[in-house]
Amino acid sequence: MKETNTAARLKEIMRDRNLRQVDILNLAKPYCEQYGVKLNKSDLSQYCSGKVEPNQDKLFILSSALNVDVSWLMGYENATEAVASSLSPANQEAFNCALRHLDTILLEMKISKKDIYTKTFLRILKYLTMLNDAGKKEAAKRVKELTFNPNFRISDEEILAAAHDRTDIKVTEEMKKHDDDIMNDDSEWE
């Protein structure tokens, strides 16, 4: 359930971190350049006043610059509520089921939920919940095909490095071997 709105969350961050609007614009500048999104003083002023809610691109930029979840910035307590609220009731149950499975997979792969709650991931998940079983299998097949194209794939070393860079646990050689085994075994995803 939506707790508040973007204006209140921006004001909270500004108060807690002693930031001014210009500071937020400066923090957002590298992300704006990276993703080709324009964010100016007028935009931010309107967001802070509550006159206008930012679109998804600008929410993503602001959340990245401020290091907060997009859904939190929107006024939700967590990302699942934000996405689920945009789905039809029939798709909400499928979405919730997918999230339960996702939690298990992320734990196995040692990936933080924070890392996956990007605009692109959430869009893909939303579309996936709209598919029947045959459509889901076809979607998985097409995504797998993209991984064979070097233009779209990150290297296995980059994937494993991200998992091994965790600071909340001590990564052992046994854990690294387990990760390598998972990376080289597609059977569970067929």
Image (spheres, rainbow, N blue to C red):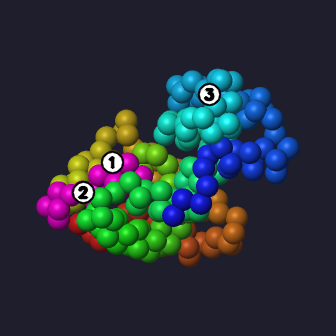
Please name the residue that numbered disc 1 is placed on: 147
Kind of residue indicated by mark 3: Asp
Residue 145: x and y in percent read 25, 48
Sequence-wise, the earlier of marks 3 and 1 is 3
Q: Which mark is residue 130?
A: 2
* Between marks 2 and 3 in the image, the one whose residue lies nearer the viewer: 3
- Given contact means CB atoms under 8 Å apart, are the residues at marks 1 and 2 in contact? no
Please name the residue that numbered disc 3 is placed on: 43
Which residue: 17% across, 62% down? Answer: 132
- Given contact means CB atoms under 8 Å apart, are the residues at marks 2 and 3 in contact? no
Q: Residue furthest left?
A: 134
Q: Residue furthest front?
A: 51
Badge 1 density bin: few <14, some 14–19, many ≥20, Cα 10 Å:
few
Secondary structure mainly formed by the magenta segment: helix
Could you say which is closer to the camera, residue 104 or residue 47? 47
Q: Is residue 133 magenta?
A: yes
Above/below status of 162 relative to 43: below
Where disc 2 sits, the SS reads loop
